[in-house]
Image (tube, grey):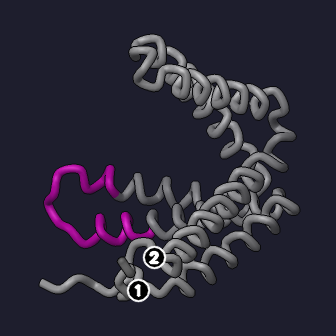
């Protein structure tokens, strides 16, 4: 078995730069980025629903066939609803995010008190408090937070991923993993 060749450092750097640019654009226009996310989710729901209905209609004498087709129809309706009312979809997604951050923060805080102090308790506690505050901030401004929260978080993710990929690309050229530098050090 041979190892697959790694992408070149230029590929990592170029992808990182592109993601950073998309991240900055998303941070400048969070409503547009958030709406794009909602459209993607809507189209995926629609496609998934169509596939569920097609799959369910092709099988015969299988328990749960009706429920399978109904679930597919429900997914299709959800996808059509999100696509036809992206603002509502954005507000709903934002509410789900706020609840996620609040529950995640509470869970991390509770978990931190069960961890030994030298095992990362402070990091877990800090992360939990930040998640709880972020969830509270988004929740307190809902539904207006729907205009900025999803797009801002997507932008931050693209930006950080872009920096990460550029850093990996730089590591390759400076003797990091996958480096092709074959020179031997002089004694």
Place of residue 137 in the rendered image (x, y in percent of width and height, measured from the top left): 78, 30
Q: Which residue is painted at 54% across and 28% down in the image?
A: 123
Q: Is residue 187 above or below residue 33?
A: below
Callouts 2 and 1 close, C-beta under 8 Å: yes
The stretch of residues the image draws in magenta is 50-68
Q: Which residue is mark 2?
A: 175
Place of residue 88 in the rendered image (x, y in percent of width and height, measured from the top left): 75, 49
29 relative position to 112: left or right: right
Q: Which residue is mark 1?
A: 181
Most extreme residue toward the top, as rendered? 113
Place of residue 153 in the rendered image (x, y in percent of width and height, measured from the top left): 70, 51
- Residue 85 appearing in the image: no
Q: Quadrant of residue 162?
A: bottom right
Query: Quick one: quadrant of the N terminus?
Result: bottom left
54 magenta-colored: yes
Q: CA distance from mark 2 to mark 1?
A: 6 Å
Place of residue 182 in the rendered image (x, y in percent of width and height, measured from the top left): 35, 88
38 relative position to 167: left or right: right
């Amino acid at each position: 078995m041979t190892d697959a060749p790694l992408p070149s450092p230029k590929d990592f750097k170029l992808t990182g730069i592109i993601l950073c640019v998309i991240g900055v654009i998303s941070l400048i226009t969070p409503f547009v980025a958030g709406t794009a996310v909602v459209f993607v989710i809507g189209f995926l729901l629609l496609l998934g629903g169509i596939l569920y209905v097609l799959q369910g209609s092709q099988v015969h004498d299988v328990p749960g066939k009706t429920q399978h087709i109904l679930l597919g129809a429900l997914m299709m309706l959800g996808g059509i609803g999100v696509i036809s009312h992206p603002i509502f979809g954005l507000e709903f997604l934002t509410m789900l995010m706020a609840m996620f951050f609040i529950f995640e923060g509470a869970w991390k805080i509770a978990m931190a008190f069960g961890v030994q102090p030298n095992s990362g308790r402070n990091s877990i506690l800090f992360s939990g408090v930040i998640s709880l505050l972020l969830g509270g901030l988004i929740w307190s401004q809902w539904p207006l937070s729907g205009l900025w929260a999803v797009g801002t978080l997507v932008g931050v993710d693209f930006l950080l991923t872009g920096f990460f990929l550029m850093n990996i690309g730089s590591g390759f050229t400076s003797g990091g993993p996958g480096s092709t530098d074959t020179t031997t050090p002089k004694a």
